[in-house]
Image (cartoon, rainbow, N blue to C red):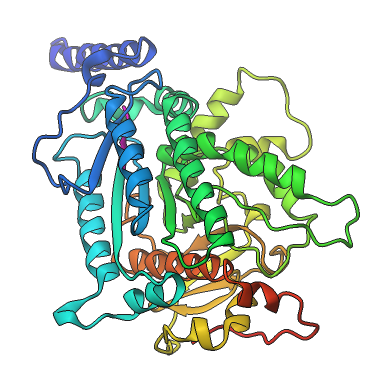
């Protein structure tokens, strides 16, 4: 009988490849631990900034985020400014040909086109709304792409880096990115405070988005702000309405976040005990796809393996530890589905003509935005809650990585615009006076 040499060689080769991949994972192989110069590429050279972070959470070039902060601080004195931060996830980095980098750059281009909204000298609804709310219809929109070592090995070896990249994302979220985002938020808070005293001044908008392990980065960076604020604002009497939380910017969005539900549980517990006033707007929106196989199967497997080396769990701790945020059903508050319901055309004069309706518009229930419906679940938190954990159909978010699809992008653009509009309106004395009404005029604006 002839020896099966090819079979033996195949086994040896497979063993070598697995050993090599495991070694690279364990020692944090430096093949991809470098920055990527951004000369050219898909980004707008004037309005998009690529902020790169190494595997230890330090900026490759601190001057890039510092320059952006200086520019925003200067320009927000003269015109309306919106900053959109995106943190990519596993298998991605800041290379010009990375598909997340290309998709984000294209999304920013379309967003600027929609928000500038001044074709042939005829201002559209967004421009008219800014003029009504601030007296200034111009706007500058900055995109910030946070690039980190989400891709640490070439494919297909990159698929064995789950545990290493999970811990890497936590380091990145606790490093220089956190300081940068807090400084951005300070600029936002200062501008918001000024608008409360002088409403007719330019506003600053700040939206942050994290996908997959990028959701872990973003959550690590901002969650302590949200948690500290909710603890401080919570009244000792359950019958007392809490004061509104400021949060982190206008809205932080986690799409298919690859972090344990355990990390969110304290916020969820505190949030469900609080009654919020009508001037509270959403602060954290978690969106998970029902067709995300990676988070439904791979994430629990990875976390279960990691749990082997930990102390035994109590009560529901195992489920919280092994399931991703959004997949742990008790924390869900909403569903996002496709709808055929007609959507009324938005009237930008509505902010001035009926401000009380805008003030009492509960953004935890949105009938229809761009063909997408935000539906509260029976176990949802109370009205005007700032924390939303939504489960989306595959038609809205396709799988784990379909985060730049048209339906989701359209929904997020409009939802963020409505949230920002309400926050801007609340700077006016007329809107704040609505809060003292005994029988407020409720209902969503058209």
Q: Taking the image as drawn, is residue 284 in sight?
A: no
Q: Nearer the viewer, residue 309 or 65?
A: 65
* Spot occupied by residue 257 in the image (x, y as percentages of width and height): 47, 45
Front position in the image: 116 or 342 = 116
On screen, 223 above or below 78? Answer: above
* Residue 319 occupies quadrant: top right
Q: Residue at x 46, y 73 (%)?
A: 133
- Is residue 353 visible in the rendered image? The answer is yes
Q: Is residue 221 left or right of residue 402?
A: right
**Residue extending furthest left?**
40
Q: Residue at x 81, y 62 (%)?
A: 241
The residue sitting at 71% across, 36% down in the picture is 317
In front here: 432 or 45? 432
Can you tell which quarter of the image residue 355 is in? Answer: bottom right
For residue 163, side relative to residue 311 (left or right): left
- Residue 109 lies, in percent from the top left, at 20, 59
Taking the image as shown, residue 311 lies to the left or right of residue 335, namely right
Where is residue 247? Give x, y as percent: 59, 49
Quick one: quadrant of the N terminus? top left
Relative depth, front residue between 131 and 114: 131
Question: Relative to 318, does residue 435 appear above or below in the rendering?
Answer: below
The structure residue drawn at horizontal position 29% and vertical position 17%, both measured from the top left corner, is 21
Q: Main secondary structure of the magenta part?
A: strand
Asked which quadrant contains residue 237, the reply is: bottom right
Query: Is the residue 208 above or below the residue 156 in the image?
Result: below
Tell me how many marks there are: 0
Magenta residues span 145-149
Residue 201 x %, y %:
44, 63
Is residue 156 located in the magenta-colored stretch of the structure?
no
Q: Is residue 418 above or below residue 151?
A: below
Reply yes or no: does residue 147 show up in magenta. yes
């Amino acid at each position: 009988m002839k020896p099966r040499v090819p079979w033996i060689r195949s086994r040896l080769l497979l063993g070598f490849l697995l050993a090599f991949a495991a070694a690279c994972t364990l020692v944090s192989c430096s093949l991809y631990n470098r920055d990527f110069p951004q000369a050219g590429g898909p980004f707008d050279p004037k309005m998009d900034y690529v902020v790169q972070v190494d595997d230890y959470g330090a900026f490759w070039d601190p001057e890039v985020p510092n320059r952006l902060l200086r520019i925003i601080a200067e320009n927000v004195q003269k015109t309306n400014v919106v900053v959109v931060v995106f943190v990519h996830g596993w298998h991605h980095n800041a290379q010009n040909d990375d598909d997340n980098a290309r998709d984000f750059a294209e999304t920013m281009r379309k967003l600027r086109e929609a928000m500038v909204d001044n074709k042939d000298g005829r201002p559209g609804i967004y421009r008219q709304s800014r003029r009504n709310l601030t007296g200034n219809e111009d706007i500058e929109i900055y995109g910030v792409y946070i690039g980190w070592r989400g891709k640490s090995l070439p494919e297909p070896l990159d698929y064995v880096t789950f545990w290493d990249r999970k811990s890497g994302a936590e380091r990145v979220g606790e490093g220089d990115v956190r300081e940068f985002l807090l400084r951005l938020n300070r600029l936002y808070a200062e501008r918001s405070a000024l608008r409360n005293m002088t409403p007719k001044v330019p506003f600053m908008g700040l939206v942050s988005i994290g996908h997959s392990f990028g959701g872990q980065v973003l959550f690590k960076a901002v969650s302590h702000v949200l948690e500290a604020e909710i603890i401080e604002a919570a009244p000792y009497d359950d019958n007392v309405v809490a004061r509104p939380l400021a949060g982190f910017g206008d809205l932080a969005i986690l799409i298919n976040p690859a972090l344990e539900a355990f990390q969110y549980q304290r916020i969820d517990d505190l949030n469900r005990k609080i009654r919020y006033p009508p001037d509270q707007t959403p602060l954290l929106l978690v969106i998970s796809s029902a067709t995300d196989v990676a988070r439904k199967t791979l994430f629990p497997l990875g976390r279960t393996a990691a749990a082997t080396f930990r102390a035994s769990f109590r009560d529901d701790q195992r489920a919280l530890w092994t399931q991703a945020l959004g997949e742990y059903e008790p924390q869900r508050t909403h569903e996002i589905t496709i709808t055929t319901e007609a959507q009324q055309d938005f009237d930008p004069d509505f902010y001035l003509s009926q401000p009380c309706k805008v003030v009492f518009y509960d953004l935890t229930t949105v009938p229809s935005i761009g063909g997408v419906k935000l539906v509260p679940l029976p176990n949802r938190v109370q009205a005007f809650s700032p924390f939303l954990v939504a489960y989306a159909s595959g038609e809205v978010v396709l799988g784990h990585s379909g985060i730049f699809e048209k339906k989701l992008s359209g929904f997020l653009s409009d939802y963020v615009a409505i949230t920002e509009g309400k926050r801007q309106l609340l700077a006016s004395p007329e809107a704040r006076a609505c809060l003292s009404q005994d029988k407020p005029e409720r209902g969503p604006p058209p």
